């Protein structure tokens, strides 16, 4: 065989080997993870309808949970982070966005973030923490949550001026242990809605001290 032909054959073999390697890597690559969210932001409401304003700080969660991967408890001593089933953002960010949207709807309010409150409405400051979160497929979702609500200094015209609250929230995840991640996500969404309802009640407790919830002081 001529030297030129040997060179061309060698080049062809190298190219074929490279193509085979690329194909193998592509075949072995992990599929894109499925993303889940805890809430969908509602459409912007008419500013004239706001009865309250609030400023919700970031929701604190344990470091082991503040990640995109959905974390499930598989036994009393084991948890697993699912690489292919994730929140659309780190868990703490998902919680904050969901609580903000739910509170805005429940309280006829606007989350002003770092901005100013609309004129003529009371401003509340809300800090929240999820101290624990256990999601067991087929059993349910349980969380220990705390929060603090206070009126802005410029609008403190009721007593008490602030409330600190703590409670344990529980939502079933269906009787089928094979219901999977979707059932856990749905249960967590309901749990966040339950939490937002209780935070809203504590805000209303500041407006009417006789209505302070039992889980607040």
Image (cartoon, rainbow, N blue to C red):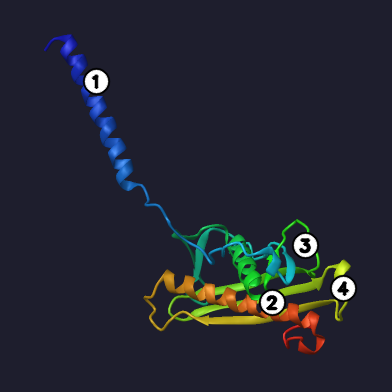
Compare marks 3 and 4 and give the one earlier in the sequence. Answer: 3
> Which residue is pictured at 27% across the width and 33% down the height?
19
Residue that mark 3 sits on:
117
SS for callout 3:
loop
Classify residue 138 as left or right of residue 4: right
Task: Please tell me how crowded label 1 is: few (under 14), some (14-19), or many (20+) other residues with Cα within 10 Å.
Answer: few
Classify residue 155 as left or right of residue 176: right
Closer to the observer: label 3 or label 4?
Answer: 3
Q: Is residue 38 visible?
A: yes
Residue that mark 4 sits on:
156
> Which residue is pictured at 80% across the width and 90% down the height?
210
> Which residue is pictured at 80% across the width and 63% down the height?
119
Depicted 15 relative to depicted 73: above or below? above
Alpha carbon of mark 1 to alpha carbon of mark 2: how far?
A: 69 Å
Residue that mark 2 sits on:
199
Task: Please tell me how crowded label 3 is: few (under 14), some (14-19), or many (20+) other residues with Cα within 10 Å.
Answer: some
Depicted 166 relative to depicted 20: above or below? below
Alpha carbon of mark 3 to alpha carbon of mark 4: how far?
A: 14 Å
SS for callout 1:
helix
Alpha carbon of mark 3 to alpha carbon of mark 1: how far?
A: 70 Å
Alpha carbon of mark 4 to alpha carbon of mark 1: how far?
A: 80 Å
**Rendered image quadrant of residue 104:** bottom right
Closer to the observer: label 1 or label 2?
Answer: 2
Depicted 170 relative to depicted 148: above or below? below
Task: Please tell me how crowded label 2 is: few (under 14), some (14-19), or many (20+) other residues with Cα within 10 Å.
Answer: many
Compare marks 2 and 3 and give the one earlier in the sequence. Answer: 3
Please identify the quadrant where the N terminus is shown: top left
């Amino acid at each position: 065989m001529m030297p030129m032909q040997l060179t061309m054959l060698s080049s062809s073999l190298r190219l074929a080997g490279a193509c085979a390697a690329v194909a193998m890597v592509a075949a072995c690559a992990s599929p894109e993870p499925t993303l889940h969210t805890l809430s969908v932001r509602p459409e912007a409401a008419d500013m004239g309808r706001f009865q309250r304003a609030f400023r919700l700080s970031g929701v604190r969660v344990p470091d082991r949970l503040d990640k995109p991967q959905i974390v499930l408890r598989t036994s009393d001593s084991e948890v697993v982070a699912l690489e292919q089933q994730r929140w659309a953002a780190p868990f703490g960010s998902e919680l904050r966005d969901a609580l903000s949207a739910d509170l805005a709807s429940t309280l006829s309010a606007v989350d002003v973030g770092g901005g100013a409150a609309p004129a003529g409405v009371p401003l509340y400051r809300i800090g929240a923490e999820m101290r624990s979160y256990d999601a067991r497929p087929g059993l349910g979702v349980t969380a220990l949550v705390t929060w603090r609500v206070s009126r802005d200094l410029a609008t403190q015209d009721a007593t008490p001026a602030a409330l600190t609250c703590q409670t344990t929230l529980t939502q079933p995840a269906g009787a089928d242990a094979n219901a999977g991640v979707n059932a856990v996500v749905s249960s967590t969404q309901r749990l966040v809605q339950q939490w937002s309802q209780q935070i809203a009640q504590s805000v209303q407790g500041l407006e009417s001290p006789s209505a302070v919830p039992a889980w607040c002081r």
